[in-house]
Amino acid sequence: MSNSAERSTTPDPINPKPSHPPARRSVPKAGSRELLEELQRQYQRAKLFSEVTLKIRQSLNLKEILQTTVVEVQRILDTDRVLIYRVLPDGTGQPISEAVLPDYQAILGMRFPEEVFPTEYQTLYAAGRVQAIADVYAPQSGLAECLVEFVEQFGIKAKLIVPIVFNLDTELPANHQNHLWGLLIAHQCRGPRQWDEFELELMQQLADQIGIAIAQGELLENLETIVATRTIELQQANANLKQEIADRIAAETARRRNEEQLRLITNALPVLIAYINTKQRYQFNNQAYADWLGQDLASISDKHLKQVWGKTCYSRMQPWVTKALAGETVTYENEIQLADGSTRSVDITYIPHYATTPAAKHPRSKKNKRRKIQGFFALTSDISDRKAIERMKDEFISVVSHELRTPLTSIHSALKILATGRLGDLSNDGKQMLGIADENTDRLVRLVNNVLDLQRIESGAVTMDRQICDAADLLVKATEAMQAMAQQHHITLADQPMSMPLWVDPDYIVQALTNLLSNAIKFSPPETIVTLSAKRLNATSNRPNSVQFQVQDHGPGIPQTKLESIFERFHQVDSSDARKKGGTGLGLTICRTIIEQHNGHIWAESTEGQGSTFIFTLPLLQPPATHAEDDHES
């Protein structure tokens, strides 16, 4: 049987050609008995249909629904075979449910090729086509001989075919073409059969119920898939949450263990260690706080600095706290009162604590992160003993210096008189000894004077007489004061003055400059140049709005390890060299004290064998704001 013959002689091997359902059967008029029997049959069939429909709706298992349908339809219609034919997406098909009498061949599971059910017939059935064939051998059935032979192998004499369609998308228009899922087919094999209207309606209604059940089954399957997927997601989320909780517990345990170790270490140290947040409240304190203040650590935690130390002490802390919260590491000294009423001198260091956070993108910036201040660490050391020793030393030096000054002055004057020859001539050896004594006495007088000057400045006994000065004038005065010494050592002084206003004590700044020039002259080889210069620092430097002074020489240089220690008292790079040059070991200490009293900073830079440069900065005098600027700012 060719494919072309099949499609030309009959449109459907299972269902030969379109036909109309049989005409409605009229109710018998012969008598009331026939009418009553007919109504009784219709009632029984309606009852059976309701029972089948109820069974279909009570099940959610599609396979069970389909099998229940074919069994009940076979029983209600008293037909030989009822099957459900599934139309597959590739055009082929196969029976998937069947109820058949034992005398006839079962066709469940047989696969039928695509030409048995062409695409154009699928379209017709999707539109609701119903086929009722009373006799496959009758000429009016329109079946070709090859198709009769095809159905004859299954013993089919008559058949009724109803499409099973459904539409999952309830939002589509009413005229949207339904999806053809399959066919509900009844076979009569004992002989021809005239299908009445009730049987057609029953088959159509059951096919509709199957379509609804299929749609619900697929929706349920989709729902189960969604539920299963969501369940897997929730299980994964739950596992992730459990892991996160476990990680957090482990992290918290590790944090507590680390904190315990940190507290164990810090509690053993005889210093105050703390962490303060940006609100100036304590977040961590070691045991020393409780020992010093006589309070338990819980009462100190989260307290403001002012609450812990009091208003007076906090007023001395506040400027340094502000600098620390601005990101600057600071060290200063303070006086604190303990629980027993005693006062201690302490050295305090604040170290800022940063946290890296994402920053808003800026068109001119390549950085996408910025550092944000989270708080600062505070380290407080007791320096009361050191301060007491320093006071004793200062007092001793002061007393000794005062006691030495008068006799030294007398001795120095007597040596000068002897050197003039007014009291008689001395031998050459005597003159030589007199010169040595005079030189050492002069050095001792300078030392005493330097000690007294340093003690007065550090103790605050000297008040800086600050006034408006020009940086250029200070350089010229210092150069002129040291010109004689420079000529004596065959050194050329070169100054590079620049006019800039300063608010300083001019005498003390000139003293600092002459001390630096004196060192540079003494340690420079002859016929070299010592340069004294000043320049204004710009806004991008570490110390904006400042004037930087420099004294540069071409001497032997200073080792890198001694660049800080040379500013300490009586510290010299080479003591033998100092004796030759006549230094006292206090010149640089006095310079540092003077500069720091003016809120400046001093340091040294050097390359051994090439020379050294001593540098210090002083704040530039800022001009007062004009009325126009004040109005603009307000």
Image (tube, grey):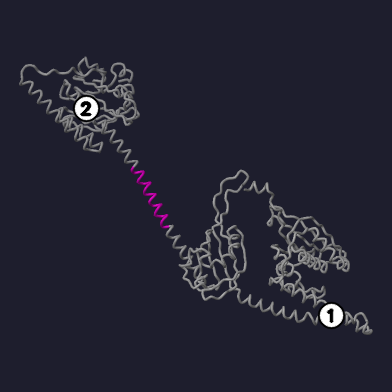
242 drawn magenta: yes
- Residue 569 is situated, as x and y percent measured from the top left of the image, at 72, 73
Q: Residue at x 68, y 51 (%)?
A: 625
| Residues in magenta, as a range | 227-246
Work out whether residue 353 can be spotted: yes
Question: Within 10 angstroms of label 2, few (less than 14), some, or many (20 or more) residues?
Answer: some
Asked where in the image residue 16 lies, by quadrant, the reply is top left
Q: In the image, what residue type sits under mark 2? A: Gln
Q: Distance between the residues labelled 2 and 1?
A: 138 Å
What secondary structure predominates along the stretch shown in magenta? helix
Between circles 2 and 1, the one closer to the viewer is: 1
Q: Residue 412 carries which label?
A: 1
Q: Is residue 486 above or below residue 184?
A: below
Work out whether residue 192 can be spotted: no
Q: Regarding mark 1 in the picture, which secondary structure is present there?
A: helix
- In the rendered image, which quarter contains the N terminus? top left
Q: Residue at x 71, y 59 (%)?
A: 619
Question: Within 10 angstroms of label 1, few (less than 14), some, or many (20 or more) residues?
Answer: many
- Residue 269 is situated, as x and y percent measured from the top left of the image, at 54, 72
Q: Residue 423 carries which label?
A: none
- Residue 219 is situated, as x and y percent measured from the top left of the image, at 31, 36
Mark 2 or mark 1: which comes first in sequence?
2
Quickly name the residue at label 2: 205
Q: Which residue is drawn at 61% across and 77% down?
A: 385
